[in-house]
Amino acid sequence: MPIVDYCREIEDYLCRKNDGHLIRVVGPSFEIVSGWAAQGVPLKVACSGIDRCFERYYRKGPRRRPIKIDFCAADVLDAFDEWRRALGLVAAGTAAATEERSAAPASSSLPAHLERVITRLTAARAMGKIDAAFDAIIDRISRELDTARASARGVRGEAREALLVRLKQLDDELMQTARARLDDARHTALVGEADAELAAYRDRMAPEAFARARDTAVDRLVREGFGLPIVTF
């Protein structure tokens, strides 16, 4: 997508988030947004970063003024970093720094992670994003997570490692169920969307690495479509 079109899409999205109040992406703002395009930040990822900025603003109370794109920059880059890490595209230095940031609270946040997974599974069902084909596996996963949550704070050593392995297995089962619900047309559409997200990286990656990144991107889009959480911790 040409940079001018990218900036226009961001401007339109920012306008909608600001309830129709037009905030132009010009001058320094244009430099920020065109920088995202140059870095290969997918439009959808940039919009998710903008969403984070607005969500944080909403939590502070009633809105007082429209938000400029400049205030969303840090959230957009955070969302971009997470997207790259998820797809295996992040630079080694950034990955190491991210691992260092996330390592410390990991043990204390496992119970909270299990709580979030259960909540999101329940929400996906309540919102109609998943059909009856998911009922059996969601009921089973929820029961296992409820049991794990009751003892997660005290789990250490080999027991903790076994729990983490089990969470990965449950996540794989959930995604297998989701993939099986895709017809050929939907799968083709998701592959096309993943290719569009990764377009800026295709020429920089070996074919095998690109194929892995595409598969990961498709799985992420499948998760979003069904509203499924990441069970793996």
Image (cartoon, rainbow, N blue to C red):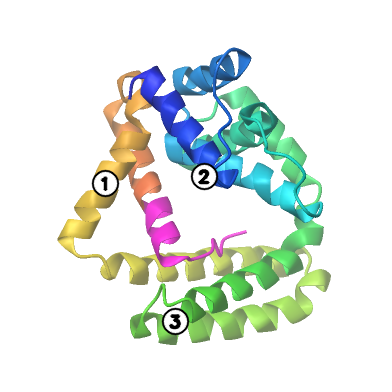
Q: Are marks 2 and 1 in contact (CB under 8 Å)?
A: no
CA distance for labels 2 and 1: 28 Å
CA distance for labels 3 and 2: 38 Å
Name which of mark 2 and mark 1 comes first in the sequence: 2
Q: Amino acid at mark 1?
A: Val
Q: Quadrant of the N terminus?
A: top left
Q: Amino acid at mark 3?
A: Ile
Q: Residue at x 49, y 73 (%)?
A: 124
Q: Is residue 170 visible?
A: yes
Tag in front: 3 or 2:
2
Q: Is residue 85 visible?
A: no
Q: Quadrant of residue 200?
A: top left
Mark 2: which secondary structure? helix
**Which span of residues is magenta-colored?**
219-233
Label drawn at residue 137: 3
Q: Nearer the viewer, residue 27 or 107?
A: 27
Q: Is residue 224 magenta?
A: yes
Q: Residue at x 78, y 54 (%)?
A: 62
Mark 3: which secondary structure? helix
Label drawn at residue 16: 2
For disc 1, the marked residue is 191
Depicted 171 relative to depicted 92: above or below = below
Tag in front: 1 or 3:
1
- Residue 201 position, x and y percent, is 37, 25
